[in-house]
Image (cartoon, grey):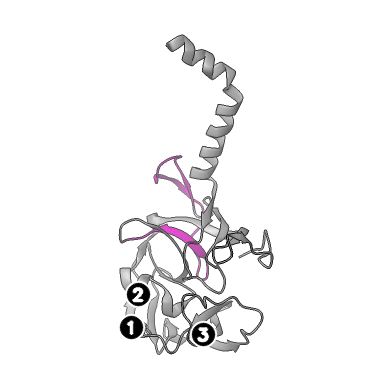
Amino acid sequence: MKAKLVALFKDNKQFLMFVLAMLLMRTAVADWYLVPSSSMYPNLVEGDRVFAYKLAYDIKLPFTDVVIKKVSEPQRGDIVTFASPEGGTRLVKRVIGLPGDTIEMVDGRLIVNGEMMEYQAVDASSVHLTPQREYQGQQLVYQESLGEFKHDIIAMPERAALRNFEPKIIPADSYFMMGDNRDNSNDSRFYGLVKRELIGAKVVRLFFSLDPDNYYLPRLERTIGKAI
């Protein structure tokens, strides 16, 4: 039996080394991630496959969550993957609050360290995908300014949602996450802050996108390799 295993390894050595290298890369360097829901519309849509860079913040021991060396810290506006504090499911959200920040929300508008963030209405008629299948009511798109960082969000004024919360002081090594689809996102408003060690990777580019409402055909309008 041992001789057969040795012979099998020799005959398939290059293939097995390739598989091992791919596993090492996916667990320690980079991975692709399927966006499963509409919580990050209009920037990430259900069916997107995105490139998640695991060395953006930490170098970890392969196949573990043991940090060998910190590379950098997550920044406000980064889109990251992380293990949910509730059950460990891998999620993708945007970093809104950093350690030391005071975060609150009033009528759907964020206040960061006492400063109201700026919101500008965006014409969503032709340039934005909105999750119409999931919600048929009014959907508005705004450009939210988090300091110098600007990105688009969706608001659903007719939908019951959590649009207000009291000021929260974020402790060290913790982050406040939110989805860009603000009125349809299960995020830090519900499951609380996310510890730094739970953050796995930074989402940086779009691989490709398949449309679950159209037989999983490719979305040709989603630009492959687009920076996120």
Tag 1 or tag 2, which sits nearer the N-term? 1
Between the C-alphas of marks 3 and 1, the distance is: 22 Å
Count of number-bearing discs: 3
Q: Residues within 10 Å of mark 1 (few under 14, many from 20)?
A: some
Tag 1 or tag 3, which sits nearer the N-term? 3
In front: mark 2 or mark 3?
3
Q: Residues within 10 Å of mark 2 (few under 14, many from 20)?
A: some
Between the C-alphas of marks 2 and 3, the distance is: 21 Å
Where disc 1 sits, the SS reads strand
Which residue is found at the position 50% from the left and 70% from the top? 40
Image-quadrant location for residue 167:
bottom left
Q: What residue did someone put label 2 on?
A: 189
Q: What residue did someone put label 1 on?
A: 165
In the current view of this chain or complex, which residue is farthest to the top?
Answer: 3
Relative image position of residue 184 (x, y in whole percent) = 42, 76
State yes or no: residue 93 in magenta.
Answer: no
State yes or no: residue 74 in magenta.
Answer: yes
120 in relation to 46, above or below = below
Q: Quadrant of the N terminus?
A: top left
